[in-house]
Structure formats: structure tokens, C-alpha cells
Image (cartoon, rainbow, N blue to C red):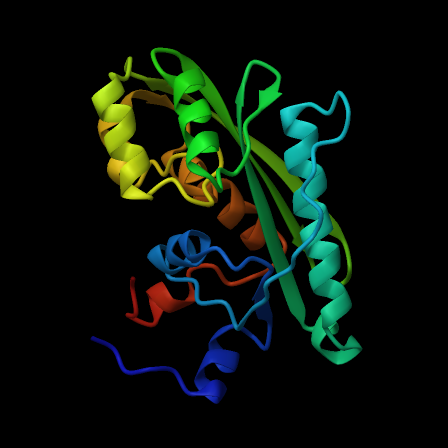
Amino acid sequence: MSRPDTAGEAELRSGGLRLVLASASPRRLALLRQIGIEPDRVLSCDIDESVLKAEKPRDHARRLARGKAEAALALLDPAERAGSFVLSADTVVSVGTRILPKAETEEQARACLKLLSGRSHRVVTGVCIVTPGGAFRERQVETRVAFKRLSLPETEAYVASGDWRGKAGGYAVQGLAAIFVQQIIGSYANVVGLPLAETAAVLAGEGYPVMARWTAGEGA
């Protein structure tokens, strides 16, 4: 196990650039750490996530990701903004054009599972990256997920587990619900909450040293 970075070492390796993760999601933080990226700061940016009338899933994911980035920028002082990348994301699960909620009650979880049972659905994550120069770079990544047909005992056992709580579409693919998934077409990381290949490509393209920890012998 490598020793923790000192502030000076981290700054030297990143060229003085900082990364602010505008998300309190432990899953997004874990995904970034998986590819050797350690945000310098993590901000919880609460915004209104209500779905607008006739809003499509991709548009919803894009709007919320940008809203979280803008909320994070408002929390940074000018000096910190000037040297920081801000990364935000929002993940949406939809059946057709219907956007499923982030389940908070057992009734919502059951309703989501009923819709997902025995069919395929879409998972769209909107990613928004704000560069140190203030430019917004946005992506929407879509993955298709097919669920097996769920029996009543399976549904009730999953609801009783609580693993669905706060999850888009009422399930977490990296958790117990993995046994319900028959097929994934596209990015698995996207279903968890952050499409890693696309996010890393945008960061690297804008000058953030994505693989700096790799070359320092500090892989995940």
C-alpha cells in the first residue's frame, strides 16, 4: 500500500491543477479512485431534480449535471475556480420516455422493479466538466440494460434489503440487483453512475493528468 500524498506531491504531479467532484455519491468517488483519480475536493450540490414537463431522459440528465456543476462553481472562490476542473454527473433510468425516480420509499422501489421486470431499459448519465478556463464540456452516455422477469419473492426480498434506497430506477447494479441483470450493452460504469472512458477522455483532452498516479507507480 502506498503512503498518502502530501499536498506538495499531489500538486506537483497534477501540474498544479485541481479536481473538484460536484457529487456526494460514494459510487462516483469509488469509480474515480478505481482509475487512479483522487479528487482534491468533494462537494455536495443539492439542486431541484424534478422532471420538467415532457422532458426527455437525455435532456434531464444533461440539465441536472450542468446544474450541479454550476452550483459547485458558486461555492468556490475565484482563486480556486481558476485552477480547478469541476466534474459533475447525473444518472437517469428510463423505460421508453418515462423517467424513473430515485427510489426513497418501498412503494417507489416496487413500482420501479415492476416496470423493469422482464424488459430492457436505458441508463443515461449526463457528465459535465468545467475547465479551469471556465469552458463547459458535456457528454451524455447511454447504456442498455435487460432485466430478467422478477418473481414476487425476488421483488420482496430486494425491497426488504434496502439496497435500492436513493438509487435511480430503484436498483444498484453493483449490489444485490446484479442477479437480475441478463444483459448490458454499453458502459457498465455508466450504470453504476459515471462512464469512466468518456469522463477520462474529456479530462485528458482538456489537460488534466488522468494517468499521473499510474506513472508514479500508484495504481488503484
Measured from the top left, where is residue 24 in percent x and y? 52, 60
Q: Looking at the image, is 127 positioned above or below residue 77?
A: above
In this orientation, which residue lies closer to the viewer: 89 or 219? Answer: 89
Measured from the top left, where is residue 153 in percent x and y? 21, 23
Q: Quadrant of residue 114?
A: top left
Q: Is residue 132 visible?
A: no
- Position of residue 215 in the picture relative to residue 1 (left or right): right
Residue at screen point 45% across, 31% down = 107
In this orientation, which residue lies closer to the viewer: 23 or 85? Answer: 23
- Position of residue 175 in the picture relative to residue 171 (left or right): left
Q: Looking at the image, is 198 positioned above or below residue 155?
A: below
Q: Quadrant of the C terminus?
A: bottom left
Measured from the top left, where is residue 164 in percent x and y? 38, 40
Q: Looking at the image, is 164 positioned above or below residue 59?
A: below
Q: Quadrant of the N terminus?
A: bottom left
Q: Quadrant of residue 9?
A: bottom left
Residue at screen point 28% across, 83% down = 3
Measured from the top left, where is residue 131 in percent x and y? 69, 59
In this orientation, which residue lies closer to the viewer: 8 or 59? Answer: 59
